[in-house]
């Protein structure tokens, strides 16, 4: 399974490196397919590569990446233990917001990465990745509040870059990260129950006996 997941991610990365599906390929230095553990329980999805990411071909390697690493350390994790990706795989010019057609061009790559990794928890960083799962949500209102489906949980949190611009948001970011272990435990229990259910069918109740008349003496 590990090899299959790693091979699938390598294939996607290879396709991303050759991609010319939208205008963003015209200005890139490197594509940034994503990086991390193919067997990660947590997948982080950001918005798009910035200056340093474009230079190195890796996600979240600038100041935002440093803050993300600090937040992971709060819950005993290193970045090598998670998988980090973005909704677009090439840097938008001047770090502008990714456009709808650019996100659409990259959507299948991200969808396939999620399918290959099958994480327990997807954490969205910022509003563009949040919109995939919370289309009408406002990050200031729903950050840190997970929702669940049959496979995993999804939790929106502030983008580290936004917190760096407004450090009063840092305690909220820390509090949201501290919820992660609890959310993972809930999803694991949910998956375990779903796996166990077919193997332990409910016992057939015994046939009902006709009621017996009570004796007075």
Image (cartoon, grey):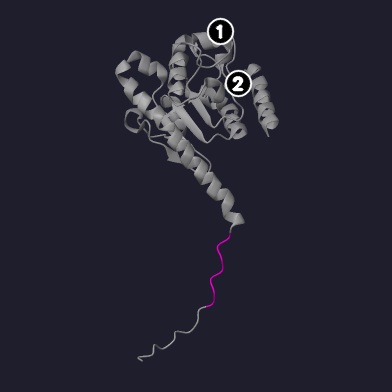
Q: State the CA–CA distance, disc 2 to disc 1.
A: 20 Å
Q: On residue 21, which mark appears?
A: 2
Location of residue 131 (image quadrant): top left
Say whether disc 2 or disc 1 marks the residue closer to the N-terminus. 2
Q: Is residue 2 above or below residue 194?
A: above
- Residue 10 appears in view: yes
Residue 82 magenta-drawn?
Answer: no
Between residues 215 and 61, which one lies in front from this camera angle?
A: 215
- Magenta span of residues: 201-207
Q: Is residue 54 left or right of residue 14?
A: left
Residue beneath the point at 45% across and 26% down: 75
Residue beneath the point at 29% across and 18% down: 168
Can you give x and y, in whole percent of width and height, for residue 78 in the image? 52, 21
- Label 1 element class: helix
Between residues 51 and 82, which one lies in front from this camera angle?
A: 82
Can you give x and y, in whole percent of width and height, for residue 61 in the image? 51, 13
- Label 2 element class: loop
Q: On residue 55, which mark appears?
A: 1
Q: Outermost residue, front direction?
A: 217
Between residues 5 and 127, which one lies in front from this camera angle?
A: 5
Can you give x and y, in whole percent of width and height, for residue 128 in the image? 44, 25
Residue 202 magenta-drawn?
Answer: yes
Neighbor class of circle 2 (other Cα within 10 Å; few <14, some 14-19, many 20+) is: few
């Amino acid at each position: 399974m590990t090899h299959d997941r790693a091979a699938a991610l390598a294939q996607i990365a290879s396709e991303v490196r050759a991609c010319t599906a939208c205008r963003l390929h015209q200005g890139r230095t490197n594509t940034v397919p994503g990086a991390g553990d193919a067997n990660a329980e947590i997948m982080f999805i950001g918005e798009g590569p910035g200056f340093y990411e474009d230079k190195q071909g890796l996600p979240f390697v600038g100041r935002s990446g440093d803050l993300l690493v600090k937040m992971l350390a709060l819950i005993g994790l290193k970045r090598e233990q998670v998988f980090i990706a973005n909704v677009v795989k090439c840097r938008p010019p001047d770090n502008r917001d990714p456009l709808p057609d650019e996100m659409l061009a990259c959507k299948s790559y991200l969808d396939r990465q999620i399918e290959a990794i099958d994480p327990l928890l997807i954490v969205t960083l910022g509003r563009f990745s949040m919109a995939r799962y919370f289309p009408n949500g406002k990050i200031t209102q729903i950050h840190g509040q997970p929702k669940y489906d049959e496979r995993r949980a999804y939790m929106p949190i502030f983008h580290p870059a936004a917190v760096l611009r407004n450090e009063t948001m840092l305690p909220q970011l820390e509090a949201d990260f501290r919820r992660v272990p609890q959310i993972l435990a809930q999803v694991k229990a949910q998956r375990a129950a779903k796996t166990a259910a077919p193997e332990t069918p409910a016992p057939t109740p015994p046939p009902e006996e006709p009621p017996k008349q009570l004796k007075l003496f």
